[in-house]
Amino acid sequence: MKKLGVAVIGTGSWGKNHVRVYSESEEANLVGIYDVSEERARILAKQHKINTFSDLDSLLKNEEVEMVSIASPTTTHAELAIKALEAGKHVFIEKPMTSTVEEAKKVIDVEKKSGKKVGIGFIERFNPVTQRSRQLIENKELGDVVLLSARRLGPYWPDRLKDVDVVRDVSIHDIDGFRFMVGKDPVAVYARGGKLRHKYYDYAEILLDFGDGVTGFIESNYLTPHKFRKLMLTCEYGIVEADFMSQEFIVEDGEFIKKRKIPWKEPLSAELNAFVSVCLNDETPPVSSDDGVKALNIAVLAMESIEEHKVINLESVSYTHLRAHETSLHLVCRLLLE
């Protein structure tokens, strides 16, 4: 069976999980890894008995590498993705796709010219909880859905380089997840949030209007002491309560409260192996660069809503206006890193 040659760029708190999944994959051949911290890469390489690349150029010139998996800080995503595409590699990018929508559009332009695949790391799409919720909504098993509500709370990760706010880092999971579950984009956004302990947004509450009486509500923070990942669906004839971590799925209708048994599976493994299969079989990525830029666009506009205390109609926002706004956000992120 043919295997896809893969290299991982970035081996920090999340990149090391990419390394583990590819090393266990039946369809991927993990050629090697690269990190700006040579020591960190060397330790991880020893654990998995794989090679390290001394620099990015040697990775991109290696003919065995057919795809790169980018799990580096967000501010590096655009540059790395463009270089990899220009070198003839397929590219998987962890969320958020890039720091700004303008950068994401540049990646898409290069993607189209290269003929290579780009996939975006929205792991919750591969969570059985999300997939079962989408099915329930599509089939109207509890009638029409009225509200999708997600709470994604937990402490700041001290071992991660934070170059992005809670909206683009955390809330964006549910922005994409809601789009996937209801099968359409929101038409308006209103958000509140603040910077309680950090120089960037560390908590946010986001309200998304999907039209036709469907609302999405997202609460995210870097504050609370315990990790919390929950979803609730309020429907015409009942409610659903689900846990993204345990994958417990509870349905309450007019007669019973039922705990549905969903076979547990690791979302990251499903996600990365799905993209490997896409590259091997020349298929369409299940989470495309278009999905990446749409979710990022909504996240950026949610922050604009926080700053300007107003509802933003997503259908009427011009790209020129958005570009000016996001550029200022990008500059703030770079200043925080210096």
Image (tube, rainbow, N blue to C red):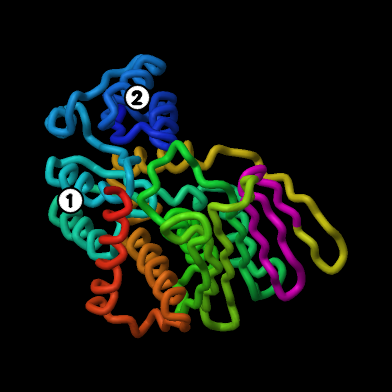
Residue stretch rendered in magenta on the structure: 229-250
Q: Quadrant of the N terminus?
A: top left
- Tell me where residue 260 appears, x and y as whole percent: 74, 50
The residues bearing labels 1 and 2 have C-alpha atoms spaced at a distance of 33 Å
- The image shows a total of numbered marks equal to 2
The answer to the question of whether label 1 and label 2 lie on touching residues, with beta carbons closer than 8 A, is no
The quadrant where residue 237 appears: bottom right
Side (left or right) of 144 relative to 184: right
- Tell me where residue 5 appears, x and y as whole percent: 26, 29
- Tell me where residue 261 appears, x and y as whole percent: 72, 45
Q: Is residue 35 above or below residue 328?
A: above
What residue does disc 1 label? 115
* Label 2 Cα crowd, 10 Å radius (few <14 / some 14-19 / many 20+): some
Type of residue at label 2?
Arg
> Is residue 338 a member of the stretch shown in magenta?
no
The quadrant where residue 36 appears: top left
- Farthest residue toward the right? 255
Q: Is residue 284 above or below residue 253?
A: above
